[in-house]
Image (tube, rainbow, N blue to C red):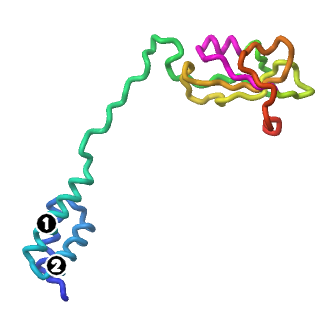
Amino acid sequence: MMPNIFSFFIYRLFAINAGEDVNRAHQLALVGSLMKNPLFGAVLINTVARQEVRTSAPSAPPPAVTAPPSASEPGSKTIEMPMLRSTQRTPRYLRDVLPKLEGEHFPRPVIHEHSVPTADPGLVLEQSPPPGTPVIPTDTEVTLIVTPGKGKISSSRKSRDAGNLSQSV
């Protein structure tokens, strides 16, 4: 069956007027021009094109962005996670880090001990979340890995085993 060129252009016009892009209008026009009944082809192409355009368009506006918690509530605004772990140049100890976390309104951190024979007791070896990560203090659980030492750890949620984290430290 040979497509009717006149019907092709009419059907293409129907599809473009319904809002279809040119490539899809060509596809629909080719299908319509191959149909035996031109009236059925015209109705089908017009209906399909309008339905496709209607279903591809957003039917509702996007959801509204909710406001963040009130800035007057301490610890409810987003901040960058502070540097709590030690570096080669700056040792940081648990006794100094805990007041810093409390001052920023973080909940009590989870503390894991990991023994490093050459390190001072209470030295913070690693932290999670990493420094610089955007966090909301009141909603963030902080995990610290520290060297064991008497009187240095005062958290009620501590663990004696930090797993295989010694290879990453």
Residue 145 in picture, x, y percent from top left: 76, 26
Q: Which label is found at residue 14?
A: 1
* Residue closest to the far left: 39
- Examine the structure image and report whether residue 162 is included in the region drawn in magenta: no
Range drawn in magenta: 98-113
- The foreground one among 102 and 87 is 102
> What residue is at 77 percent from the left and 23 percent from the top?
124
Residue 131 in picture, x, y percent from top left: 65, 28
Q: The residue under label 1 is which amino acid type? A: Phe
Q: Earlier in the sequence, mark 1 or mark 2?
A: 1
Q: Residues within 10 Å of mark 2 (few under 14, many from 20)?
A: many
- Examine the structure image and report whether residue 111 is included in the region drawn in magenta: yes
Q: The residue under label 2 is which amino acid type? A: Ser
Q: Residues within 10 Å of mark 1 (few under 14, many from 20)?
A: many
Q: Are marks 1 and 2 in contact (CB under 8 Å)?
A: no
Residue where numbered disc 2 is placed = 33
